[in-house]
Amino acid sequence: MPAVSPGLATMELSLTTGPRRNWANLSKPLIDAFGPGRRAAPGFHPHHDRIVRLGLHHPVTSGIGHDVTIDA
């Protein structure tokens, strides 16, 4: 995945789940996953304030059970 250039950012995420999955609990960990992870350098800050437009989409399909499909 290419790096995001410095400055403000727009993010579009689509989480396809089954009808029984609570998709809202997945959004924060998903956004955090775009950072360098737990082995980040000391003092790392994920710069969530850079995201000025966030689109969250939630298609529901009964055929995937408890799985989640993510498109970013």
Image (spheres, rainbow, N blue to C red):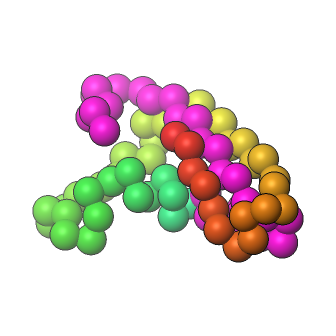
Residue drawn at 79 percent across, 62 percent down: 63
Quadrant in the picture for residue 42? bottom left
* Residue 57 sits in quarter: top right
Q: How many labels does the image show?
A: 0
4 or 63, which lies in front? 63
Measuring from the top left, give residue 17's x and y in whole percent. 73, 60
What residue lies at 81% left-to-right and 55% top-to-bottom?
61
Q: In this view, does 23 lie to the left or right of 70?
A: right
Q: Give residue 3's position: percent from left, percent from top.
A: 27, 34
Which residue is more in the foreground, 45 or 36? 36
**Observer able to see residue 22:** no
Drawn side of residue 14 relative to residue 33, left or right: right
Residue 47 in view here: yes
Residue 25: x %, y % from top left: 67, 68
Image quarter in which the N terminus is found: top left
In the image, 18 versus 6, the foreground residue is: 18
Q: What stretch is highlighted in magenta?
A: 1-27
Q: Is residue 67 magenta?
A: no
